[in-house]
């Protein structure tokens, strides 16, 4: 190897090693000792990845969503990596360390691939070293290392671009086409977004190149066939496998958040951290989106402006601007044009103009984090600026000016990108690897050695959480995520709760019923064949009333300062014994105050009560009686307006209503919407004081859900109101019945039926309780 070729590579390797050890040396010396994150997505992604490696099945996970489980494609568990590690059992105990190393090594691999790309575009080797290293430092995917782990592999775009360039240069185009096909398919099985971003990038480059070739009369069917091999075949193979292997029904066909997860101008062209962002924020408002962060650096912005000015000057003076070079498609221009088109897609276009188009392209709607596609523009724009500036400002025999400008642009990437790595480095070595039993604290070790988990069938976390279906679900806390997932991993017991994506709607509905009050029949009971008891893990945090009821029926088996373990038998969990509610009613009845047809557990006759049955609105879909309110989900639907002084100051109230939750595809999108308490001010301004997501309702009674909103009145002198609001574009009709408001400290009863003078059916706080 010639010295001129050797030294740049040695320097690049040295820079990579110095940088990674400087920021991540603690992790590199002991990669299996740390978790980069133990909150939210980070904790979940470590858990699903580590658990799937030791699972008995290659493709099915029983870690969550008990008793139904889930396909590994929906867990964000990096399926390709879990399968490989299953083949290498001697590495399974180091699974966390392996993914940590891969994430950190991704920086170096990115820099190396960018170096090869820059050299391919005839950038001087030493300059290519500085530029490649700098672009890798500023890569926006660094922020994914502490959350969506699988999205943290920043080299997947440079690798795919490099393979495409080798395809362009090689005479063995079918070989490189097959290589691209395998590369894309691999990344699909790391994370579906990575595969789809590659397909979009390569397909768009082929589309641009096809147009150029068509006008140059250089297009042939072989080229089109190679394009299909590189893009269409991996997409069809992955989509086909995902569809044919999926044993779950009722997944949502309308994932939420496409237009809410786009990128925007500020996220790509304006700084998102120190040192520049605070300076700009003092002059202007910066609005950026997390999913769309793909900041190309101040150097790139300045470089693009310089080049646009240069090209405009050339166009005006010489009246020409060529997209081709030496009779062949210019791969850099092709990549730039493709990246601009993808950036527009990441901005939400053309769907910003015509939202209805999304319904015609369902595959695009499934990739709702569309802002992530802006990463393509990041790599192409930064690379393109370096390549073009180094050429356009270089005079024959006098490269100094070009070198200075290009080096300054590259160094600006480092100055801004170092802040990214400081932020991440401060987090990655703070938390021990709790998936390694030896790194658990003594309380955990004592618990794991004391409790015989083989006596139990599954874990019920409290506070409960179930995330995924977008129709029936409830978020938890970082603490309960951490405790329950670690308990599930070390005990080898599945979680009844869930934290994934696009979970079956009907499965989610059934699972949510586990926490519903005992007076409602639970459809999930018939799907649980195991007769062993459940373990409840309680994180000592605030619970909802129905969660507290489940906890109260458990028997404590272990307790420490962080959490409590209880056991509850299957019969007790699914008990429908309502005797205690009727006994409590009988004891309180003599002390209750009558108000119309209702009995209130207070002597205060001024206690607020409001109830409307909607029986005056005939409706074949009714929870009780013969009527129910039908209203369009997209409208603002007022349920109750409060006049001045109608409610009491500093008083908590609970409003509730029954919502029909069934419909096409198990009621898809029906339980999505907001239940809002709003205060109206004299100046015409409004304030949403309390908002409840309808899908979080845990009171599921067959095809009906009881939706509750607890709100506090702090200024009764103002008018206020309760209303419902759904998606502006929704075509769904809501059916609502029995709207009810009470003071939170007061229980409200009504005897609905009786026998021999004893009640057999009660209305209690809008619940219906049948004696058994």
Image (cartoon, rainbow, N blue to C red):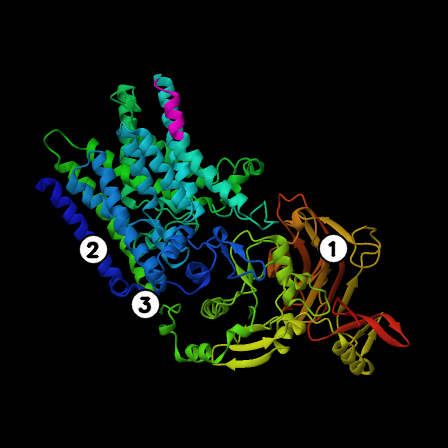
Residue at 67%, 72% in the rendered image: 571
Disc 1 packing (10 Å; few <14; some 14–19; many ≥20):
many
Nearest to the eye among marks 2 and 3: give it.
3
With respect to residue 377, does 426 lie above or below? Answer: below
Residue at disc 2, secondary structure:
helix
Examine the residues drawn in magenta and state their main secondary structure: helix
Dot label at residue 736: 1
Residue 542 visible in the displayed image: no
Q: Earlier in the sequence, mark 1 or mark 2?
A: 2
Q: Position of residue 427 (x, y in %)?
A: 34, 64
Q: Earlier in the sequence, mark 2 or mark 3?
A: 2
Residue at 40%, 80% in the rendered image: 442
With respect to residue 380, does 590 lie above or below? Answer: below
Is 368 placed left or right of 99 in the picture?
right
Disc 2 packing (10 Å; few <14; some 14–19; many ≥20):
some
Question: What are the residue bounds of the magenta stretch?
Answer: 218-227
Tell me the residue that label 2 is attached to. Answer: 17
Q: Position of residue 257 (x, y in %)?
A: 53, 48
Measure how far apart labels 2 and 3 are at the Cα level: 20 Å
């Amino acid at each position: 190897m010639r010295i001129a070729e050797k030294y740049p590579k040695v320097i690049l390797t040295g820079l990579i090693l110095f940088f990674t050890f400087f920021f991540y040396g603690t992790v590199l010396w002991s990669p299996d000792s740390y978790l980069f994150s133990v909150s939210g997505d980070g904790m979940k992604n470590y858990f699903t990845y580590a658990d799937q490696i030791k699972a008995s099945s290659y493709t099915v996970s029983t870690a969550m969503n008990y008793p139904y489980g889930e396909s590994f494609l929906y867990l964000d568990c990096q399926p390709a990596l879990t399968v490989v590690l299953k083949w290498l059992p001697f590495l399974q105990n180091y699974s966390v360390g392996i993914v940590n190393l891969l994430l950190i090594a991704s920086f170096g691999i990115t820099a190396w691939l960018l170096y090869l790309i820059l050299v391919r575009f005839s950038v001087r080797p030493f300059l290519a070293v500085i530029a490649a290293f700098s672009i890798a430092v500023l890569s926006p995917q660094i922020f994914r290392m502490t959350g969506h782990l699988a999205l943290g592999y920043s080299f997947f775009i440079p690798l795919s671009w490099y393979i495409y360039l080798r395809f362009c240069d090689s005479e063995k185009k079918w070989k490189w086409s097959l290589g691209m096909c395998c590369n894309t398919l691999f990344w699909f099985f790391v994370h579906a977004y990575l595969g789809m971003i590659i397909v979009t990038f390569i397909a768009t480059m082929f589309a641009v190149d096809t147009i150029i070739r068509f006008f140059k009369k250089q297009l042939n069917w072989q080229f089109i066939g190679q394009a299909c091999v590189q893009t269409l075949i991996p997409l069809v193979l992955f989509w086909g496998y995902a569809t044919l292997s999926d044993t779950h029904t009722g997944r949502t066909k309308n994932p939420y958040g496409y237009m809410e997860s786009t990128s925007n101008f500020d996220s790509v062209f304006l700084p998102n951290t120190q040192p520049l962002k605070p300076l700009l924020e003092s002059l202007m408002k910066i609005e950026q989106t997390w999913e769309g962060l793909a900041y190309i650096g101040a150097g790139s912005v300045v470089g693009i402006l310089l080049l646009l000015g240069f090209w405009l000057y050339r166009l005006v003076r010489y009246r020409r601007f060529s997209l081709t070079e030496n009779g062949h498609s210019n791969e850099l221009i092709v990549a730039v044009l493709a990246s601009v088109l993808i950036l527009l897609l990441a901005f939400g276009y053309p769907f910003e103009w015509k939202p209805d188009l999304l319904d015609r392209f369902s595959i695009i709607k499934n990739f709702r984090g569309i802002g992530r596609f802006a990463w393509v523009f990041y790599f192409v724009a930064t690379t393109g600026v370096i390549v073009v500036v180094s050429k356009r400002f270089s005079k024959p025999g006098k490269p100094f000016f070009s070198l200075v400008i290009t080096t300054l642009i590259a160094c600006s990437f480092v100055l801004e990108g170092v802040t990214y790595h400081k932020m991440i480095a401060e987090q990655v070595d703070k938390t021990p690897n709790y998936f390694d039993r030896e790194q658990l604290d003594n309380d955990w070790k004592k618990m794991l050695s004391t409790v015989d988990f083989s006596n139990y069938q599954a874990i019920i976390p409290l506070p409960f959480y179930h995330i995924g279906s977008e129709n029936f679900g409830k978020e938890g806390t970082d603490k309960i995520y951490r405790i329950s997932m670690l308990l599930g991993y070390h005990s080898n017991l599945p979680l009844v709760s869930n934290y994934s994506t696009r979970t079956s709607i009907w499965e989610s509905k059934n699972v949510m019923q586990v926490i519903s009050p005992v007076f409602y029949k639970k459809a999930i009971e018939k799907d649980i064949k195991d007769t062993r008891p459940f373990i409840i893990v309680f994180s000592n945090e605030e619970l909802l009333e129905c969660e507290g009821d489940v906890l109260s029926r458990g028997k404590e088996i272990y307790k420490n300062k962080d959490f409590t373990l209880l056991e509850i038998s299957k019969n007790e969990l699914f008990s429908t014994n309502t005797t205690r509610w009727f006994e409590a009613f009988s004891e309180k009845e003599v002390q209750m105050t009558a108000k119309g047809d209702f009995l209130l557990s207070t002597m205060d006759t001024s206690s607020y009560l409001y109830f409307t049955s909607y029986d005056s609105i005939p409706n074949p879909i009714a929870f009780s009686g013969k009527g129910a309110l039908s209203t369009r989900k997209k409208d603002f639907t007022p349920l109750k307006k409060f006049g001045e002084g109608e409610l009491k100051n500093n008083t908590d109230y609970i409003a509730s209503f029954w919502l029909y939750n069934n419909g096409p595809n198990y009621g898809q999108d029906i339980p999505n919407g907001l239940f809002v308490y709003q205060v109206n001010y004299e100046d015409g301004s409004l304030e949403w004081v309390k908002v409840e997501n309808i899908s979080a309702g845990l009171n599921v009674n067959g095809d009906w859900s009881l939706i509750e909103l607890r709100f506090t009145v702090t200024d009764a002198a103002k008018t206020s109101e309760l209303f419902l609001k759904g998606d502006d574009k929704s075509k769904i009709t809501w059916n609502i019945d029995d709207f009810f408001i009470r003071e939170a400290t007061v229980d409200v009863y009504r005897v609905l039926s009786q026998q021999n003078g004893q009640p057999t059916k009660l209305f209690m706080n809008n619940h219906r309780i049948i004696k058994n």
